[in-house]
Structure formats: C-alpha cells, structure tokens
Amino acid sequence: MSSSSSSNETLVSHQTFVLIGIPGMQEKNSWVAFPLFVLYALTLLGNIMILYVIKIDQSLHEPMYFFLCLLACSDLALCMSTMPTMLGVYWFDSREVPLNSCITQMFFIHILQEIESGILVAMAFDRLIAIRDPLRYKSLLSNSVIAKIGIAILSRGFCFCFPFPFLIKRLPFCRSNVLSHSYCLHQDAMKLACAGIKVNIIYGLVVVMCSIMLDVLIILVSYILILKTVLSIASRKECLKALNTCVAHISAILIFYIPMIGISVAHRFGKHLSPIVHMLMANIFVAVPPLLNPVVYSVKTKQIRQRIGNILQFKNK
C-alpha cells in the first residue's frame, strides 16, 4: 500500500517552480538586492532617456535612431519581464512561482531575445546602406519600410517562440521543482521534467540555427561588405568617420551575443561549473545588455550625447 501511494505521489506534476538567488547562500540574497535595484532603475532611466531624446529632437528622426528606439523598447520590455521577479527573490525571498506564470515569463524572455537579435540585424543593414549608398539612404529606409521591418521582426520572434509554452506545458514535473536561476528559462525548466525532452531540445536547436546563428551570419556578411566599402574610400579621415558610425552597433552586438552564447554553453557543457558561476552568467544574460546599450549609444553617438548634455544643463539652470 505504501509503495503504491509513493508511486502515485511521484506521478503528481508540480504546479509551482522554486527560483533561487545565490546557490547555497540564500541568507545572503539581500546583499544582491540593492545593487540589482540600482541596476534596474538605471536601466529604466537610460532607455527612457534614449526614447525621450529621440522623440523631442527632430534631427534624430532618421532610420538609425528609429532602430535604436526599437532596441530601447526591447530592452525595457526584457527588463520589466525579469527584474521584478529577480528583486522578489533577492529582496523578499519570494521564490515560488506558479507554473503558468513561469511559462509566461520564459515566453517573453525568449521572444524578446529573438526580437533584439532581429533588431541588431536591421541595424547592420542600416549601417550597410548608410555607408554604401548614402544618397539613397533615407529613401530606401523610409518610415513605412522601417515599420514593415519592425512588424517582420515581431512576427518572426512570435512564430519561433510560440511553441515553447506548449512544449513545456506538456511535460510532467514530478521530481525537483527547483530552477537554477532567479527567473524562468526554457532550457532550465525542461531539465526538471520526468519525461522525454528530445522534442524540446531539437526545437531549441532549430530555433537557434534558424534565427540566432543566421542573424550572426547576416551581421558578419554585412560588416564584411561595410569594411570592403570603407577600405575603398580614398580619404583616411572619411574612412575613419564611416567606421566610427559602426562602433556603437558593434558594441551592442558583442554586449548581446556574448552573454547569450555564454549561458547556452554553460547549460550545455557546464555541468561541472559552480552553481554561482551559472547564477552570475544568468543574471548578466538578462541584466547587462539592457543597461549597457543606452550607455554605449549615449557615449559613442555624438548627437545623442549632445542632446542629453543639453537636457541636463537646462535642468541645472
């Protein structure tokens, strides 16, 4: 009788997941809470400032800055999708999350990552057209074209990520329900399933190959063409000026893809790594790009830097 009841218990699927902060040192979670809150506030402030500056300055109503607005919106959405949960874990020790809420969060995290990758591809095209065909730059990237590109990026992200909630929802979770991060990820949750996850793994690989890897390839080809064009410019000054317009975008590419590749490799091959390493990489993955993107574009883009400086000087008067 006891053996049958225990077997029935193991078949019951968990309806909640437990998030963790600092592995093995839960009592020290509060140490992370305040820095995380400051990072959250700075991320919101930086991206809202970028949107505000571009909105009020008519001279910034150009394709490059419209794509930057899309990037800022994506970063804000990612920040608001993850930071409240993370702050709840670290500050209030609120670690339990219902299954459906966890699935919803992982859907938004993955779709926003897909969208940001697509925006970076669009920004690479923007730089390519601006450098190779500057006379037709604004006509080729009109407002209607940019709107269509934005809709295409959103549609692609939705189509790729729509199956993820259903792939997770079908799985029974009858073993541990403790996730290894302070937010929900598909590759993290599926490891806890007590059923076959081959479909999840295969679909995840298909998505990575058809979106992220393809995006990286397109960006690489775009910059090869940009470099080829720039090197054909006779004037060294004009050559450096053209390359300088790409510095912020290249920085955004590195800021986005390096943490993404890092956490993917850690999930796939890093079972021997310390749980604290996994925790740090997971937090960097969602927290650092939205924070650094507005900083990079504010520092490396002269027009935005000057406009922010003017706003701060006006407020100090």
Image (cartoon, grey):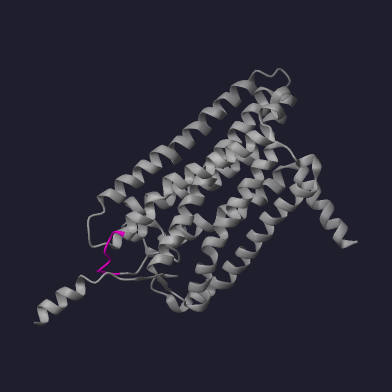
Q: If the image is split into quadrants, where does the N terminus sit?
A: bottom left
Q: Position of residue 267 (x, y in %)?
A: 36, 54
- Which residue extends farthest right? 317
Q: Position of residue 234 (x, y in %)?
A: 71, 17
Residue 171 shown in magenta:
yes
Considering the whole magenta stretch, tell me its main secondary structure.
Answer: loop
Residue 298 in sight here: yes
- Judge left or right: residue 163 versus residue 3: right
Residue positioned 50% across, 49% down in the render: 113
- State the image quarter where residue 175 is shown: bottom left
- State the image quarter where residue 245 is shown: top right
- State the image quarter where residue 165 is shown: bottom left
> Between 115 and 24, which is closer to the camera in this rendering?
115
Residue 246 in sight here: no
> Between 101 and 303, which is closer to the camera in this rendering?
101
Residue 258 in the image: above or below residue 76: above
Residue positioned 86% across, 56% down in the render: 313
Residue 22 in the image: above or below residue 243: below
Q: Position of residue 124 (x, y in %)?
A: 59, 34
Q: Position of residue 133 (x, y in %)?
A: 67, 22
The residue range painted magenta reads 170-176
- Which residue extends farthest left? 1
Residue positioned 48% across, 45% down in the render: 157
